[in-house]
Amino acid sequence: MSAAFGSLVMAVRGIGSNWLRTLLTMLGVLIGVASVIVLLAIGTGSSQAIEKSIQSLGSNTLTVFSGSSSSSSGTEIRNSTLNDASVTALSNSSNDPDVKSVSPVVSTSVSATYDGSSYTTSVIGSTASYLAAENYTLSAGRSISRADVVGHAQVIDLGTSVASALFPTGSDPLGKQIQLGSSEFTVVGLLASKGSSGLSNGDAVAIAPYTAVQDQLTGESQSFSQLLVQGKSSSTLSLAESEVESTLASLNDTTVANLPFTVIDSASLLSTATSSSKTFTALLGWVAAVSLLVGAIGVMNIMLVTVTERTREIGIRKAIGARKGVVLIQFLIESTVMSFLGGICGAVAGILVSHFRIDGVTPVLASYSIPLALGVAIFVGIVAGFYPAYRAASLRPIDALRYE
């Protein structure tokens, strides 16, 4: 125990004998550890933001897009559309027991104006079930209703971005008539803020009965650009997808393999995005690891210089009886302590930086990143210091004493 303590004391004295060089060596480790923590926090924050954004797009939903079917040879054989018959068929609980609701969708982008203010918004024509399927809630007023759809009522629910752009702060948009293109729509509801998904701004929308949108904005049509199908639960969404594909295939007199529509599962989209985010986070981690490698090279370089400078000291110690293991441990302790102190400072710096928004991303501190970075820093100190320490311990006393 006394020999180990003596080695520790001498290691600390060696570190403090040239404090400026020690600080510069620790700086390399500090930057490496801080980089690992910050970059992993950025990756984790990006991943969580993407997952939250995709989840906000809808709850247990399938999106059916119009398309054209092709034969096994690749030639187009049918051009099919989504229409009222599609909605009726998919809403039949006998055929599709795992489907909760079906919302037809028509959309267009128009300039909304009110009292001199204007805002280009995406107008979505659908039914009342669309709001629940897309996780929209109301902050004031009411949502569009089935009666509005049947009566072709020119009423609308506004997203927060649209409402704030058209109406002064503190005013009440409910009951006001806004201009969409050349048509007037009455504001009956205000949507609660949903935020941006990165793919689209969920607050820059206006939702109206699809019948009124077709009448006034897109022109009358017997087809829809897409259908939003909400499943009864996430656990049965795959069953709902199979039911939807089978129903549409039967309705269009074709097979599921040649289905003239594209069905996208929100859960699959989330899974793909999550996988990509994990890859991105891992890549950032490896980039940060390069900084730690540079720090390790710095530690090894300084330890080699230290061994060279203290060759006579090593010779004297060995001449008066210091064993090889004691000298080895002394220099290993020096390199490990420098790396550990650099790692502690790097962890503190990384935690502080992770509290700031970086390039539009809010970092989320990964719980494993701090012990991981500190563990790697200690490992770096041991590995980087082993060869210089072994070299010092292997010096013959007579050669060390002769060294000038």
Image (spheres, rainbow, N blue to C red):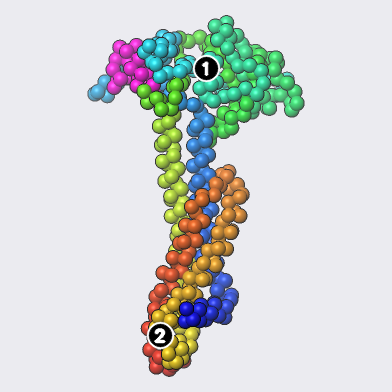
Q: Is residue 248 magenta?
A: yes
Q: Position of residue 34 (x, y in %)?
A: 54, 58
Which residue extends farthest right?
170
Q: Is residue 221 visible?
A: yes
Assess whether residue 324 is covered by the magenta stretch. Answer: no
As drawn, 159 above or below 321: above
Residue contact at pointers 1 and 2, CB within 8 angstroms: no
Name the N-terminal-most of marks 1 and 2.
1
Taking the spot 43% from the left edge, 70% from the top edge, the residue there is 382
Give residue 295's position: percent from left, percent from top.
48, 66
The residue lying furthest to the top in this view is 151
Q: Is residue 66 visible?
A: no
Position of 200 with respect to 395 (left or right) is: right
Pointer 1: what residue?
Answer: 129
**Residue in view at x 49 percent, y 81 percent:** 2
Tell me if residue 83 comes above or below residue 294 in the rendering. Answer: above
Q: Which residue is mark 2?
A: 323
Where on the picture, by quarter, is residue 84?
top left
The amino acid type, in three-letter code, at marker 1 is Ser
